[in-house]
């Protein structure tokens, strides 16, 4: 992307025939040639900041936005912002991807920084990218990225554990997605009584049972049950995740219970937010863990088939 068609002019005295100027010389010439052009951009950026801060508008002009957009990945650029001798810019990540060749003019990039454009960015205040989802906040350009990685309005990842699902959305949309696309079990109520069955359990090292989604206290919870190896020991694990942020998840508690033949195991804990991935929760062992031998004992019979009944309840902390 060319910065307003600004082109670096290298004086003949700065080099001999067939000799390229140094990156320092190019950067100096580029900054000088670009200075007059960026005066308009800086003025625009200042007006944008004042306009946003005073509530006069939520977004900068498209021209300033385009200046800060990497032409390769189309993401916003952050220092160091690189440019070729002809004024085309790109972000530092894409500089490595294009093997130090300008994707616009194919000129060698070198190590020229576009300091003028970095100054433009410093002057901006922009709305969060999740403004359309409800975030009302405005941030300096260089603080915006950090906020967006933690914004409470950012979309949630699909909590389905049976496959790697890349779908994201708000909670209401994900509940419909789980029901219609993944065909999960949907239940209303704050107590549950589930039976998990598996033939030839000795042959199963890793398995995931169908996710169950509960509507309880006007919120949604996901009940997971699966088999995996904990070190050298085969185990089963049940745990609950809350469809919302971690701060809201802490308002609830849950218990899980499994047993038979006069013996039982009980787990009590706080549901984890679906902001934490299914794998992260599982690997932290934050749930009811049952050794396979114990699970088969609870199943009764000849212990050749898993027939495990898990009961539990969810309650709201006062």
Image (spheres, rainbow, N blue to C red):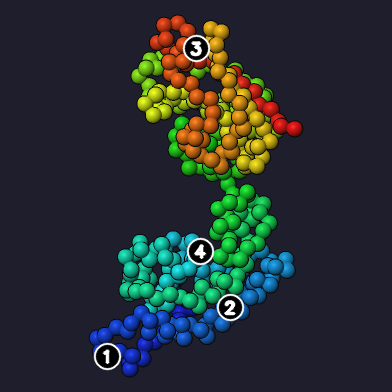
Between the residue at mark 3 and the residue at mark 2, the CA separation in whole angstroms equals 71 Å
Instruction: Name the image quarter holding residue 11.
Output: bottom left
Q: Which residue is mark 1?
A: 16
Please count the marks in the image: 4
Query: Residue 39 lies in what quarter of the image?
Result: bottom right
Viewer-closest of 47 and 61: 47
- Which is nearer the N-term, disc 2 or disc 4? 2
- Secondary structure of the residue carrying numbered label 1: loop
Q: Which residue is mark 2?
A: 42
Q: Quadrant of the N terminus?
A: bottom left
Specify few, some or many for label 4: CA neighbours under 10 Å numbering under 14, 14-19, or 20 or more: some
Q: Nearer the viewer, residue 178 or 110?
A: 110
What's the CA distance linking mark 2 and mark 1?
36 Å
* Residue beneath disc 3: 298
Q: Earlier in the sequence, mark 3 or mark 4?
A: 4
Q: Position of residue 14 (x, y in %)?
A: 33, 90
Name the spot of residue 41 as percent of width and height, x first. Answer: 56, 77
Local crowd size for mark 3, using a 10 Å CA cut-off: few (<14), some (14–19), many (≥20)? many
Question: Of callouts 4 and 1, which one flags the residue occurring earlier in the amino acid sequence?
Answer: 1
Q: Nearer the viewer, mark 3 or mark 2?
A: 3
Q: Is residue 43 above or below residue 140?
A: below
Q: Do the residues bearing badges 3 and 2 touch, measured as CB atoms within 8 Å?
A: no
Secondary structure category for the residue under label 4: loop
Alpha-carbon distance for marks 3 and 1?
86 Å
- Decide which of tag 3 and tag 1 comes sooner along the chain: 1
| Front residue of this view, candidates 36 and 2 | 36
Measured in 3D between alpha carbons, the distance from the residue under mark 3 to the one under mark 4, in whole angstroms, is 56 Å
Question: How far apart are the alpha carbons under marks 4 and 1?
Answer: 38 Å
């Amino acid at each position: 992307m060319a910065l307003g068609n600004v082109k670096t002019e290298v004086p003949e005295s700065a080099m001999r025939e067939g000799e390229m100027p140094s990156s320092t010389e190019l950067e100096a010439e580029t900054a000088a040639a670009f200075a007059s052009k960026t005066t308009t951009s800086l003025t625009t950026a200042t007006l944008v900041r004042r306009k946003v801060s005073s509530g006069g508008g939520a977004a900068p002009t498209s021209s300033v936005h385009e200046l800060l957009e990497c032409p390769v990945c189309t993401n916003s650029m952050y220092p160091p912002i690189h440019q070729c001798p002809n004024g085309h810019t790109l972000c530092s990540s894409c500089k490595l991807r294009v093997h130090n060749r300008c994707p616009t003019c194919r000129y060698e990039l070198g190590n020229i920084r576009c300091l003028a454009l970095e100054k433009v960015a410093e002057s901006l205040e922009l709305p969060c990218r999740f403004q359309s989802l409800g975030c009302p906040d405005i941030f300096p350009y260089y603080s915006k990225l950090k906020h967006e990685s933690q914004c409470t309005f950012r979309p949630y990842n699909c909590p389905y554990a049976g496959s790697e699902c890349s779908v994201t959305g708000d909670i209401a949309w994900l509940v419909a997605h789980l029901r219609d696309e993944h065909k999960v079990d949907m239940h209303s109520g704050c107590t549950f009584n589930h039976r998990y069955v598996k033939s030839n359990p000795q042959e199963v090292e890793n398995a995931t049972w169908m996710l169950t989604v509960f509507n309880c206290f006007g919120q949604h919870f996901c009940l997971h049950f699966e088999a995996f190896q904990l070190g050298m020991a085969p185990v089963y694990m049940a745990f609950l995740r809350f469809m919302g942020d971690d701060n809201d998840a802490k308002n609830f508690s849950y218990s899980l219970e499994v047993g038979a033949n006069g013996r039982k195991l009980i787990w009590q804990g706080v549901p984890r937010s679906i902001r934490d991935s299914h794998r992260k929760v599982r690997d932290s062992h934050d749930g009811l863990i049952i050794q396979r031998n114990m699970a088969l004992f609870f199943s009764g019979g000849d212990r050749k088939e898993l027939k495990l009944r898990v009961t539990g309840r969810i309650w709201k902390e006062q």
